[in-house]
Image (spheres, rainbow, N blue to C red):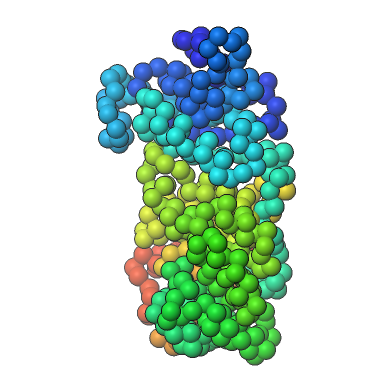
Amino acid sequence: MKDAEWSGFFADAKALDPDAYIRLDYYFECSGDPDLAAAHFCAEQSTAQWRRIGFDEDLRPRFGARVIDLEVLASGRTSFSYDIGKRTPGEVTACRVRIAHPHANFGPRIPNLLSAVCGEGTFFAPGLPVVKLLDIHFPDAYLDAFEGPQFGMRGFRDLLQAYDRPIFFGVIKPNIGLPPEAFSDLGHESWLGGLDVAKDDEMLADTPWCPLERRSALLGAARQRAEAETGCPKMYLANITDEVDRMLDLHDVAVANGANAVLVNAMPVGLSGVRMLRKHARVPLIAHFPFIAPFSRLDHFGIHTKVFAKLQRLAGFDVIIMPGFGARMHMSDDEVCDNVAACLDPMGPIKPSLPVPGGSDWAGTLEPLYRKLGSADFGFVPGRGVFGHPMGPRGGAASIRQAWDAIVKGVDIDTHAIAHEELGEAIRTFRKPSDSAPAEQSDDKRTGGEP
């Protein structure tokens, strides 16, 4: 550290109480001395000025964020990765830094946590116009103050009595504009074909043409009929995304009418609103991902999507729908797998959430997705792959189940489709050239639930 005045923002990780700090991994690009830039970065997101004029004191030992590891990734650059703000003189250095931040500064309150680690001090630190929060690690002492998921992945499986396989969701399509009667008929047919969960689209609100009260009453009744006809538990997932002061009432209406899970667009509503709902909810909470991409899409700026996955789990979501594999979702396979791991990996007392990586799925994308994840602990969520099937949603749902049966039997879907008409129609309707390549097995990633 060239400037001794700023050395108070550095620490040996072994000398810190691990229960008192969260760990934050950032990428940043700076001009000038990277050590000094990292020290300023810590100051701005914690103490800022650390002593009063005329007083012999130092607030950093109690309140200061500290650099515990700093790695220079590249130096001598002539420009930043992005043209953000005014150009400062000097060579540009790219770094990865791990910071220990005392969580007593903000307590077990998500808005205050985010204000500290993703706020003004982080994204407006001097000389660091390019910043990305890559990961966040919570000590058990911090996690103990959060409820986390009420049901979690295991409880969600228990409700559906569905084990050792993926959970099969379906987004009722067309997603918006249908009257409740037509909407409920489609859901009923999909349950009869084999879906576990028929869901509202994240775009379908409490609208005049499809009000939640009427829609949930019809879908709730249709769900109960489907359970009687199939002998299997079914779930209707109602979207209650709305203004925060309406969500509890919408939850109560939907649940009283027979919805046995509710969907919330996590970031538009806000994670504090979700945490409030978690304390009230009697059914599982399912997250959807609108408003996350604008924060995460750039490689070197913003917030990594796995941070959002961890925060949604912390707020209390039992199931987290996230961008999945495939070009449409603009996400690398590694990032999808990171997000799945953020739902499932040990997190102190917080239960695992069921990960649901989605995007343009149909029966033919089930096996590649399963092979990439190496486990059956996920949800599979087609839209048109079920509701755009030529044989209707019953045929579309059946094609998904038939694709899983092929995986269990160890045969390819083309062979299995010879004796299964619904799967054959799905292949003829939805297959693209990119879907036909065989997926590689990844045995070392298996975590359970394999056929």
Residue in the foreground of this view, choosing between 27 and 71 = 27
From the viewer's perspective, is residue 206 above or below residue 357? below
Residue name at image x 50 percent, y 62 percent = 243
Residue in the foreground of this view, choosing between 448 and 267 = 267
Residue in the foreground of this view, choosing between 168 and 32 = 32
Residue name at image x 36 percent, y 58 percent = 327
The total of numbered circles placed on residues is 0
| Residue 46 placement (x, y as % from top left) | 54, 28
Residue in the foreground of this view, choosing between 416 and 323 = 323
| Residue 82 placement (x, y as % from top left) | 30, 36
From the viewer's perspective, is residue 303 above or below residue 90? below
| Residue 19 placement (x, y as % from top left) | 70, 33
Residue name at image x 72 percent, y 38 percent = 141
From the viewer's perspective, is residue 76 above or below residue 347? above
Residue name at image x 52 percent, y 81 percent = 215
> Which residue appears farthest toward the front when viewing the image?
54
| Residue 386 placement (x, y as % from top left) | 46, 78
From the viewer's perspective, is residue 103 above or below residue 201? above
Task: Give the quadrant of residue 166.
Answer: bottom right
In the image, is 26 to the left or to the right of 299?
right
Q: Is the C terminus in the top left, top right, bottom left or bottom right quadrant?
A: bottom right
Task: Give the quadrant of residue 285.
Answer: bottom right
In the image, is 180 to the left or to the right of 354?
left
Task: Give the quadrant of residue 9.
Answer: top right
